[in-house]
Structures are given as C-alpha cells and as structure tokens.
Amino acid sequence: MLFNDDSPTVVAWRTIGILAALFAEAWNIANLTVTGERASEHFGYFTVHSNILIAGVWIWMLVQPRRPAWFEQLRGAATAYIVLTGLVYALLVAQPEEVWSWDITFTNLAHHRLLPVLAAADWLLVRSAQPLRIRRAWLWMIYPIGYLICCWIRWGIDGWVPYPFLDPATNGVLGLIPSTGQVLIAFIVGIYAVALMSRVAHPRVGSEDV
C-alpha cells in the first residue's frame, strides 16, 4: 500500500518526526551548559546533521507540494543518512545493552531509533513525486566522505573527534583503516540499498532512468 504526500497519515508521521528531531536537538542545545560540551563539538556529530537534514526535507515536503526535479535525490540522500545513523550507532557506538533497547534517553531514542524508522517507512510507503535516477546515487557519498575528511582535519587542529572509531590517537593511523572502511562500505551498501528500494517500492516512478 502506497501513500501520497497529502495523505493525513503521511502528514502525521512527518509532523511527529519533525517535532521529535527539533525537540531533541533543542533539548541537547539547552543541556550544553550543563554537560560542558562545546557547541563546536555538538554540531560536529553526523547524527545532528542527519536529523536536521531529514527534518528540513520533511518540512519542505509539507509546505511545498511543487518541488524541483533534483529534490528526490536530496530526499533519498537524507533518508540514507538518517537510516545509516541508526545502524552505525547500534553497531559501533551504542553500549551492548543499548543496541536493541528502546529504554534509552529521549534524545537517543529520537535521533537513533524513531527518526531512522520513520524515514525508512516514509521512503518505502510514500509515492515519489519525481523519478529517482539511481545511477546518480554515488553523489550521495560526497557528503559522508567530506565529513570524514573534516573530522580528521579537526582532530589535527584540536585533537577532538566525534566518534571513537575515528580517533587516530586511540586506534593509530593504520587502525583507522578497518573501522573507517567498515563505515564507508556500510554507507555505500546502504545508499544503494535505499536508492534501489525506490525501484522496488515505486516501479513505475523509478522506471524512467536507472
């Protein structure tokens, strides 16, 4: 069963997702003074980026029915990023007892569980307004690769990295190869899985161009 953008069900879950993402982010920002975390560190997390991006995409979709031809690529990239945020968190960042648990803090619940699930459902169940050109999905890797490069530049400047598996001081430069390689492979596989799912979920929409 596929839904349209203006379906009350779709509007409802997108609204819930937007509010959850923005409220969780506002909660984190309000707690910066309590936790002592620097704003430059907080906004250095891929989780923050992916949640803000998917919320922005959904806001756009709610307020602007007519969208440019390239918008479906943006929607696909945002979906891939947030879904992979949830997977990478579960596999590489979360404590063992948190991997399958929903009994975690609200911000983690929103950013790493609720938003990835809602985004995956939205991608699979809502008809695309424009055909998705799957052969262009490689462009979705530009941002994750750029993010990795910026993380290591930042580490060279002040020694801070957002995630332990990216830390040269802990893993050594050669030790970054397997951990970073796993993440990059996961992103490549995840990005093309998301892109190809548009063909499976919306065969007529995706059939114009591969």
Image (cartoon, grey):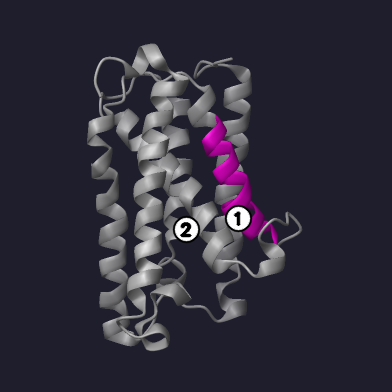
Which span is picked out in magenta?
105-121
Q: Does the magenta stretch include residue 110?
A: yes
- State the SS at label 2: helix
- Residue 86 vs residue 9, the one in the foreground: 86
In the picture, the disc for residue 123 is none
Residue occupying the point 76% across, 58% down: 103
Q: Residue 24 carries which label?
A: 1
Say what amino acid the circle numbered 1 marks. Answer: Ala
Q: How crowded is mark 1: few (under 14 residues within 10 Å), some or many (20 or more)?
A: many
For label 2, count other residues whose C-alpha is less than 10 Å away and answer few (under 14), some (14-19) or many (20+). some
Residue 114 falls in image quadrant: top right
Residue at 31% from the left image edge and 33% from the top image edge = 73
| SS type, badge 1 | helix
- The residue type indicated by label 2 comes to Val
> Where's residue 26, x and y in %?
57, 58
Marking on residue 48: 2
